[in-house]
Amino acid sequence: MSERQDFRDEELTAYLDEEADASLRDRIDLAKQSDSVLLARLQQLEIDRAQLRDAFGGLLGHAPEPPAFLSQQQTEQPAARRYIIGLAACAAVMMFVGVGIGWMASESRLQDWKTAAATYHMLYVEETLASVSIAPGEQSDQLARVSNALKREIRSDSLNGVAGLDYKRAQVLGYEGNPIVQLAFLTSDGVPIALCITKTGDPQTEVTASRYSGLNAVVWAKDGYEFIVLGDTSANRLLDFGRHFQSSL
Amino acid sequence: MFGKKSSDAQFRRGLSELFPRLWRYCIALTVNRPDADDLAQAACLRALERFDKFTPGTRLDSWVFCIAHRIWLNELRAARIRRGGGIAPIEDLDLVDETSDVEMNISAREVLRSVMRLPEAQRIMVLLVYVEGFSYKEAAEIAEVPIGTVMSRLASARKTLTAADNERSSKKA
């Protein structure tokens, strides 16, 4: 009679999953012939994989439709792709501008530009902005470009000097052919914050807390422009930021 | 599967065909339908950004699953915890009840519920290996853990699922 062997649960699992190597498989096969404890342990680990597949198979019919941007044809793809690879930090921006317009227009979940901006901001993490450091001259050039796109002057002193908020960069995004200026900040505790502005012609409204794409936000309108401040932080904190920008911009 | 020069449309079509399975994997990751919707969409967006990093001849599904896994662990889950949402308790998963139509019998719902109650790390491995059919090696690469970790998580999951199954059987008896 062979000496009884102790197998770990992981080894028995690999055996049941046909992932055990030949040596382990042979040892377990041999032990099964005389070891009732081993047989009981194997039974304790037995599951019905077909039942699992069936149960989860039922979920597939409940999946939402694939995002509309997957069915978009992308012209100028090679150039856009090279740009995406070369500028990792700007990759999402290219998607937003180059692909996103068609997607945003047709994607029912993205009901307006603020939702689109929030969905884009969801991909921001601290690392997205932590290494961004722009020289004062370049910062001025950036702000001149976005001011020109927006047809509204954005001055650096309007963005700097907000307690607990470090201004990082400005860029032009697009939604349904209309420019959106995104001004990115990082809080002192590493939370990315975005201030996005677009011309809507909306009448003046007060700073109001809201939520878009699961993110807290504050929105207001002023002089025919709509503003949104987004971030994965408390509504009160965003209200403070929003009131500051409402006054400074 | 896709050559470097293959059309962008072909890559997108591959992602579209994969989307229901990707979304199901996102359900296993998030146990929350809105988060799964957002995660699946974000994973597709990220996959398009990184199209040129996809190696022709390798599996698109495991590549995109790995992207979803990284986004969940590194970005969205942390964000959900920061928002104070934490990890949703199983009671918050309305999906199981949503699927209470004729195509999913009671037994299947109970199995689904048992898996969704597993700890996240075990739940993911069950989905990858037992539902999706990935090998241990492939599952380890998707979740970026050693194969030994895959084995131990599956062993723990098997014990829990068997115990739950026995409990259901004894209640019916």
Image: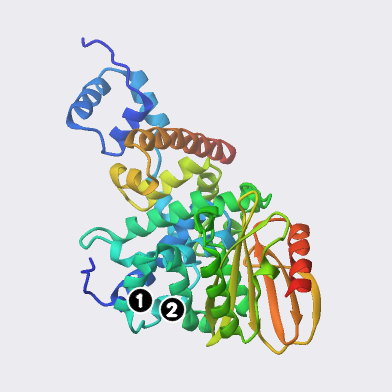
Reading the image, the residue beneath label 1 is A80
Residue A247: percent from left, percent from top: 79, 72
Snapshot quadrant of residue A7: top left
Q: Residue at x 65, y 53 (%)?
A: B92
Provide the chain ID for the residue under circle 2: A
Provide the chain ID for the residue under circle 1: A
Q: Is residue B90 left or right of residue A223?
A: left
The disc labelled 2 sits on which kind of residue? Val
Q: Could you tell me if the residues under marks 1 and 2 are in contact, i.e. CB atoms within 8 Å?
A: no
Q: How many marks?
A: 2
Question: Residue A99, labelled with which disc?
Answer: 2
Residue A228: percent from left, percent from top: 68, 72
Circle 2: element type: helix
Q: Is residue B166 left or right of residue A34?
A: right
* Nearer to the camera, A115 or B23: A115
> In the figure, A31 relative to B154: above or below?
above
Q: Residue at x 51, y 56 (%)?
A: B27
Snapshot quadrant of residue B10: bottom left
The disc labelled 1 sits on which kind of residue? Ala
Circle 1: element type: helix
Residue B64: percent from left, percent from top: 37, 59
Q: Residue at x 33, y 83 (%)?
A: A76
**Mark 2, other Cα within 10 Å: few <14 / some 14–19 / many ≥20:** many
Q: Residue furthest right?
A: A206
Locate the C terminus of chain A by quadrant: bottom right
* Nearer to the camera, A165 or B135: A165
Locate the N terminus of chain A by quadrant: top left
> Do discs 1 and 2 share a chain?
yes
The span from disc 1 to disc 2 (Cα, nearest Å) is 10 Å
Tell me if I can see residue A108 in this picture: no
> In the figure, A138 relative to A148: above or below?
above
* Nearer to the camera, A133 or B129: A133
